[in-house]
Amino acid sequence: MKLILLGAPGAGKGTHAQQISEKYNIPQISTGDMLRAAVAAKTPTGIRADEFMKKGALVPDEIVLDLLRERIKQPDAKKGFVLDGFPRTIPQADALGKITGIDIVINIEAQDEVIIDRIVNRRSCSNKSCNAIYNIKNKKPKKEGICDICGSPLYQRADDNEATVRNRLAAYHKQTAPLIDYYAKKGKLTSVKSIGIMETFDVLQKILDGIKPK
Ligand code: ADP
Ligand code: ZN
């Protein structure tokens, strides 16, 4: 199964991509996680990307596409994958179309006010091979500041503050939202409302169980 999760920052792409990855045994491919790993490792890519990410702007397409092409070639992605945070622009979607077919695109809908509140309360696992996501209001870890899954400390992403979130939302509306129409025209799009984590995941499972694995 090859799927794309579309949606604004904080709509729940990362959380649901992780649930889908576990349940359907396909890798979660998050360009945001890959970029943050590059920033932390201070690679040339990471140093360039950091300038954009700090401001809440999109990283240039060619940087993201290089990372994505490398990742999607890995053997674990042969049987399928869930793309989280990619594509984010029409040129990225066009490039993806040349690399692979996609079974379904799910657009997770959430309102801007809800998103800002969620992102400011978001905490992420600092272990790069885990990347679990929590919310200090409604998805608290069992022990404060510690990941339930791997026991690593949680941290707040550098771009998870109100000022940067507003820029990320603006970038989303301008550059990413046009992908909704783009995939609708290709007959690939299904929209789902972001209600609660488990409720939304139930809806997602019904949709995914209804499509044939490829
Ligand atoms: P969110 O969806 O909450 O914004 P992500 O982890 O997906 O979080 O992205 C964080 C940042 O990484 C974005 O604001 C952007 O700067 C960069 N980024 C991630 N994926 C892409 C992409 N496909 N194209 C351009 N920039 C990206
Ligand atoms: Zn963890």
Image (cartoon, grey):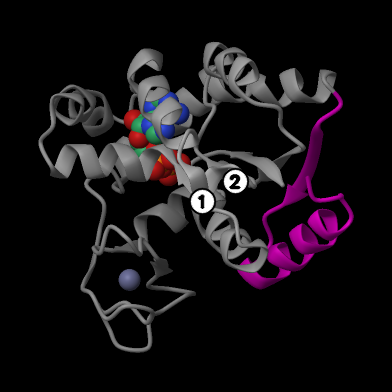
Residue 1, image x and y in percent? 72, 47
Which residue is identified by label 1?
28
Q: Which residue sits at x=44%, y=48%?
A: 116
Which residue is most to the bottom? 142
Looking at the rendered structure, the secondary structure element under dot 1 is: strand
- Residue 200, by quadrant, is bottom right
User: Is residue 178 at all visible to an observer of this figure?
Assistant: yes
Please tell me whether residue 208 belongs to the stretch shown in magenta: yes
Q: Are marks 1 and 2 in contact (CB under 8 Å)?
A: yes
In the rendered image, the vertical position of residue 144 relative to residue 119, given as above or below: below
User: For residue 81, which numbered disc appears in the image?
Assistant: 2
Instruction: Estimate the x, y position of residue 75 in percent, counting from the top left.
Output: 50, 44
Amino acid type, callout 1? Gln
Query: In the picture shown, does residue 80 fall above or below 173?
Result: below
Please tell me in which quadrant of the rendered image residue 176 appears.
Answer: top right
User: With 141 as the anchor, is 102 left or right in this view?
Assistant: right
Mark 2: amino acid: Phe
Badge 2 marks a residue whose secondary structure is strand
Tell me if 52 is positioned left or right of 135 in this view: left
Q: Is mark 2 within 8 Å of ligand 1?
A: no
Residue appearing at x 78%, y 45% in the figure: 214
Q: Residue at 37% across / 88% down in the picture?
A: 142
Q: Could you say which disc has been placed on residue 94 in the image? A: none
Of pointers 1 and 2, the one earlier in the residue sequence: 1
User: Percent from the top left, x then y, of residue 10?
Assistant: 49, 49
